[in-house]
Image (tube, rainbow, N blue to C red):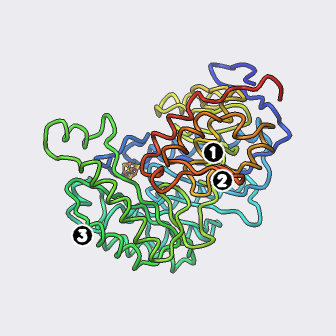
Amino acid sequence: MMVGSAQGGFVLAIDDPRVPIRSVYVHIPFCTRRCQYCDFPTFRYTLQREATYLDALVAEWRLWRQQVVFGPLETVFWGGGTPSRLSDAGLAHALECFRDHFELGDNVEWSVECNPESLTAEKATLLAQAGVNRLSIGAQCFDDARLASLGRTHTANQIRQAVEHARHAGIENLNLDLICALPGETPDELEQDLQQALALQPTHLSVYTLIVEEGTVLKRKKERGEWEPLSEDEEADQYLLVCQRLSEAGFQQYEISNFSRPGFACRHNLRYWENGSYVGTGLGASGSLPGRRTYNLTRLQPYLDRVANGCLPIDHEDRISWASEAEESVLLGLRTVAGVSAEAFRRRFGVSLQELFQRPIAEMSAVGLLQADTAGIRLTDRGRLLGNEVFAAFLDAATEPSVR
Ligand code: SF4
């Protein structure tokens, strides 16, 4: 439970301090310029901001070390923003400080998000030398005109160069992020994107359907009638095309938007979908600790001030009841192709999936969106297209048994 605040900051006392945390997320909130579809907490990069932010980030790591027990880390994910936007010196300093504060397990998966234009040969080498062994490169698409219209600051050629730099530095485990259902995108154009991505032989592909978020340039342009989104049917067809082409190319789909070569599923993201514990550090980062979710401050100056006062920069936290945790575990687990394991669920919650979610399981199975058997529950192919309907059925559906 949260035991108090000092100078407006949180002091944590987690419910079971003996359970060591083995996953850490780090947010680097800088980009060259905001992409038109982006609503993430990110700021325009300046060298001055980098120096101030990295000092605060390192201080935040120290505070977490004082308040939470960490085991050797099994997964680390640096996201953003654009971690590769840091200067060479800033990146080297941050990598070194991270290693000073956290012990890495022998088999750690350490991922770092990069944008093609800022992943130079020097940065790829710095990352590899520090122990980073997985890069997630924001490609989005391979058409220069569409990249420009999304506000991306790179070309298709720079994606290829970034992959080359990563490989040359010795990092072979590479994800490419792609976006489908882009304004006016035809199935042929999507095919081209997939072919060009596959030609780079990544181990992993994340393919997201474009979502038009509130407050983005894309949303304002849509409201002004400057572009029309694809219809729901066209969007579904694009998603099915992605699943089919990547399966033909030997990729296994393991989550709604994620595909990997056998053995290359992202272990850090799997921890999220297993509703496991991790600490989120940096501006706007969220974390999941036993019985609680933490949400860091999203505005830069309050974040810097809070850390300077010697307090964790947590804006607020949610206490998670037993029933909410069970529900979250199902909602997150259903995003994966493997679904929710009946045995793992019973081990964690002491009751069966059927006992707790009898109604939504029956309803969603009856309409062909869910498959339920003794091994557990999972979305059907159609259920993956209509995931939101299934998730809505499970919301607030857990009935806490009187005895557990
Ligand atoms: S690079 Fe990523 S985080 Fe930065 S503005 Fe673009 S989408 Fe947002």
Residue 133 % position (x, y): 61, 68
Is disc 2 placed on a helix, strand or loop? helix
Q: Residue tagged by mark 1?
A: 58
Based on the displayed image, in which of its 4 quarters is residue 395 positioned? top right
Is disc 1 placed on a helix, strand or loop? helix
- How many numbered discs? 3
Residue sitting farthest toward the right: 18
Residue drawn at x 47%, y 45% as measured from the top left: 387
Hey, what amino acid is under mark 1? Val
Say the numbered circle drawn on residue 278.
none
Residue sitting farthest toward the front: 366
Residue 180 % position (x, y): 33, 58
Q: Residue tagged by mark 2?
A: 97
Q: Residue tagged by mark 3?
A: 188
Is disc 3 placed on a helix, strand or loop? helix
Marks 1 and 2: in contact by CB < 8 Å? yes
**Of the pair 209 and 393, the residue shown nearer to us:** 393
State whether residue 307 appears in this view: no
Name the N-terminal-most of marks 1 and 3. Answer: 1
Based on the displayed image, in which of its 4 quarters is residue 109 positioned? bottom right
